[in-house]
C-alpha cells in the first residue's frame, strides 16, 4: 500500500497536486488521517476484478476506517448491489478482532465487495483519527491487512 501524506496539506508536491486536480478527489487533511492505496496484492500481482482476492487481518489503530474500491481512473465501480466499500463500523470480525473481505466478481459469504469484473482496480484504505504516521508505516511495522489472490475466472 502506498500513501501520499502531504496531499492534504500546504506542503503538497506538484505531482500529487496534479493527481488530485485530475481525479477531483478531496484529500484527507494531515491532522485528520491518512489514505493508503493498493494496486497490487502482497506478491505484486495487479488487483484484477476477474479474480477473487482476500484482504484480511487487522488495521492500524484508528477511530474509524473505510475501504473503498475504485477503477484506475478513480471512479467507483458499478455493480448490481451498489456496494463500493466497507467501514470499520459495519465489518464482520472474528472473536480476535480480525476481518476478511473477499473482493471479486461473484458473491461470497461474509464480507464481500463486488469488483464488477473489471480488469484492474484500486483499493483505498483510509484511517481517520489515527496515531499512525506514514513514516512509521514504511517498513510495514503496523498491522496492515494482507491482500492475497485466491482464484481467478
Image (tube, rainbow, N blue to C red):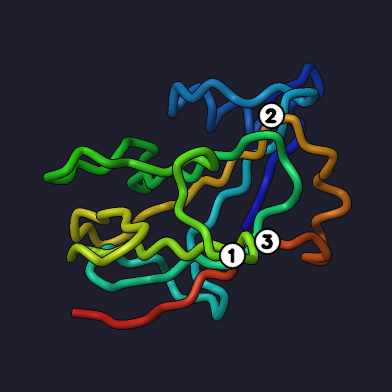
As drawn, 24 above or below 75: above
As drawn, 137 above or below 19: below
What's the CA distance linking mark 3 and mark 2? 21 Å
Residue at left 36%, top 65%?
Answer: 102
Do tag 1 and tag 3 residues touch (Cβ < 8 Å)? no
Left or right: residue 38 versus residue 77 is right
User: Residue 144: which numbered mark, if any?
Assistant: 3
User: Residue 7: which numbered mark, if any?
Assistant: 2
- Residue 51 spot, x, y in % from top left: 28, 73
Q: What element carries label 3?
A: loop
Q: Earlier in the sequence, mark 1 or mark 3?
A: 1
Residue at left 53%, top 75%?
Answer: 44
- Residue 9 spot, x, y in % from top left: 76, 20
- Residue 12 spot, x, y in % from top left: 74, 26
Q: Quadrant of residue 5?
A: top right
User: Residue 95: which numbered mark, if any?
Assistant: 1
Residue at left 18%, top 65%?
Answer: 106
Compare residues 5 and 98 and report the one nearer the observer: 98
Compare residues 137 and 67 and report the one nearer the observer: 67
Number of numbered discs on residues: 3
Amino acid at each position: 500500500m502506498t500513501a501520499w501524506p502531504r496531499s492534504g496539506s500546504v506542503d503538497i508536491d506538484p505531482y500529487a497536486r496534479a493527481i488530485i486536480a485530475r481525479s477531483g478527489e478531496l484529500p484527507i487533511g494531515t491532522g485528520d488521517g491518512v489514505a493508503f492505496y493498493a494496486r497490487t496484492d502482497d506478491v505484486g500481482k495487479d488487483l484484477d476484478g476477474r479474480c477473487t482476492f482476500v484482504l484480511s487481518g487487522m488495521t492500524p489503530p484508528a477511530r474509524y476506517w473505510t475501504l473503498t474500491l475504485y477503477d484506475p481512473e478513480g471512479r467507483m465501480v458499478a455493480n448490481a448491489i451498489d456496494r463500493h466499500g466497507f467501514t470499520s463500523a459495519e465489518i464482520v470480525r472474528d472473536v480476535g478482532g480480525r476481518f476478511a473481505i473477499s473482493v471479486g466478481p461473484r458473491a461470497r459469504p461474509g464480507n464481500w465487495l463486488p469488483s464488477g469484473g473489471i480488469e484492474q482496480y484500486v483499493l483505498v484504505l483510509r484511517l481517520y483519527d489515527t496515531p499512525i504516521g506514514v513514516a512509521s508505516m514504511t517498513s510495514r511495522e503496523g498491522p496492515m491487512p494482507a491482500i492475497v489472490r485466491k482464484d481467478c475466472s
